[in-house]
Image (cartoon, helix red, strand yellow):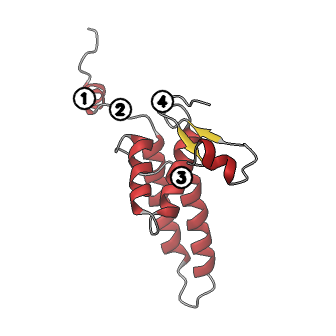
Amino acid sequence: MFFRPGTTRIPFRTGDEARKGGSDGRRIELDPANDYHARAAMEAYADSCALDMPWLAEWLRDSTAGGDAGLTNCASTVRRVFDLAQEWASREPDYAHAAWEHVRMGLEAALSAHLRPKEHVDDKVAALSGAGAKA
């Protein structure tokens, strides 16, 4: 079976290798160009394999975002891990709830800014200055 250009096949084995391995024939085809969840899955996989296979992690990151990944495609994972870290920290005698919440607010702002559509700075300046308004 042929795959569309710009998609990633998992498992990476092809043809005879897949048949010899006892695979049941199921494959997953990820299309990062059109599927947000595919980009998040590839980012997570790249993070997971980075220590053992840095070449694969680099290739996955480059193929996912064309080399311009920005902050993250896995905001929900970042939030989940932050919650877990805060829970662990809360068990310590020197836990400072206000400090953790301050960091959470900054993290949420960064994640939210990353997810919002990019606006042109000139558009903001024009809106604030009233430039382009009809008289």
In depth, the one of 103 and 51 nearer the eye is: 51
Distance, label 3 to label 4, CA atoms, is 27 Å
Dot 1 amino acid type: Asp
Q: Which mark is residue 122?
A: 1
Q: Secondary structure at mark 3?
A: helix
- For marks 1 and 3, the one nearer the N-term is 3
According to the image, label 4 marks what residue? 5
Q: Are marks 3 and 4 in contact (CB under 8 Å)?
A: no
Q: Secondary structure at mark 1?
A: helix
Q: Are marks 1 and 3 in contact (CB under 8 Å)?
A: no
Q: Is residue 60 left or right of residue 74?
A: left
Query: Which of the 4 image quarters holds residue 92?
Result: bottom right
According to the image, label 3 marks what residue? 75
- For marks 4 and 1, the one nearer the N-term is 4
Dot 2 amino acid type: Glu
According to the image, label 2 marks what residue? 119
